[in-house]
Structures are given as structure tokens and as C-alpha cells.
Amino acid sequence: MVNFKINWDGLGIATSVACAIHCVVLPLILTSLPLFGINIIHNIFFEWGMIILAFGMGSYALLHGYKTHHKSYLPLRIFILGFAFLITKQFFLNYEAYFLIPAVTLIISAHYINYKLCRRSKCSSPHHIH
């Protein structure tokens, strides 16, 4: 059996960065995709799918850190505030960057703080998979 660890905070940070790249850089670089019948920029299903995926992974990592290691609500509060900005972005597309930048910054900060708090309690927040 292979025994390896998943750092859920690291995965959450990676997901947040991927979301930021998708929302900010992709429209600048790939504006020609619709010419080929490909539309992932402002595709409602893709956008909400990424939000749900990031929320699920982030919630798992932060709740695990809270319950098992540090009992601090700080990462959870920062995460929820970040997601409030992220969801608000979906309804005010003309102001997307004004909501996206704080959203990603807060979500990544929540994972980083959770990671640091877990490390302080002698855990790096990974989970064993068998």
C-alpha cells in the first residue's frame, strides 16, 4: 500500500491561485477562444463549478485544522469573508477585479494562517491516504 500525505491548505492555495489566473489572466490572453467555439471565460457552469470546488476543499482543510489542531476561528472567518467577495463578484461582473483581488487574497491568507497554526501545533495539516 502506498501511504502519502495531502496538504489540503496547499491544495486550497493552489486552487485559489488557479481561480485568480482563470479570472484575471485568461481573458487577457485567450480572447480568441470563442472563435474556435470554446468559451470558458464567464461560463456560468465553469465559474460556479470552480467556486464550489474551492469552497469544498477549503472548508475541509480549515475545519480539519480547527477541529483537530488549533481551535482558532480566525482562518474560518477570513475564508468566509473571501468567499463573500468571490460570490459577490459573480453578480457584479463590471467590477469583477474589485471583488476578485480581495477574495483571492483573503482565501489564500486563510489557508496560510491555518497552515501556520497547524504547524505550531506540530501538524502540517496533511492527511494520510491509503
Image (cartoon, grey):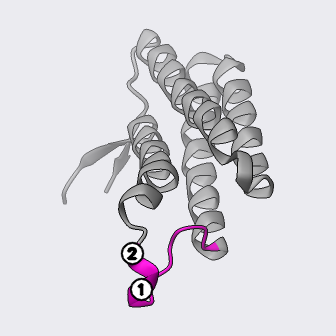
Q: Position of residue 57 (x, y in %)?
A: 54, 50
Q: Where is residue 4 in the image (x, y as percent from the top left)?
A: 25, 47
Q: Which of 110 and 92 is in front in this view?
A: 92
What separation in Å lies between label 1 and label 2 (alpha carbons)? 6 Å
What are the residue bounds of the magenta stretch?
A: 32-43
Rendered view: 1 above or below 16:
below
| Image position of 41 (left or right of 10) | right
Residue corresponding to mark 1:
35
The three-letter code of the residue at mark 1 reads: Leu
Residue 23 counted in the magenta span: no
Circle on res. 54: none
Rendered view: 122 above or below 100:
above
Q: How crowded is mark 2: few (under 14 residues within 10 Å), some or many (20 or more)?
A: few
* Tag 1–tag 2 contact (CB < 8 Å): yes
The residue sitting at the bottom extreme is 37
Residue 33 counted in the magenta span: yes
Measuring 50% from the left and 79% from the top, which residue is drawn there?
A: 39
| Image position of 67 (left or right of 9) | right
Q: Which quadrant would the N terminus be assigned to in this image?
A: bottom left
Secondary structure, mark 2, is: loop
The three-letter code of the residue at mark 2 reads: Ser
Residue corresponding to mark 2:
32
Q: Which quadrant would the C terminus be assigned to in this image?
A: bottom left
Q: Residues within 10 Å of mark 1 (few under 14, many from 20)?
A: few
Q: Nearer the viewer, residue 18 or 125?
A: 18
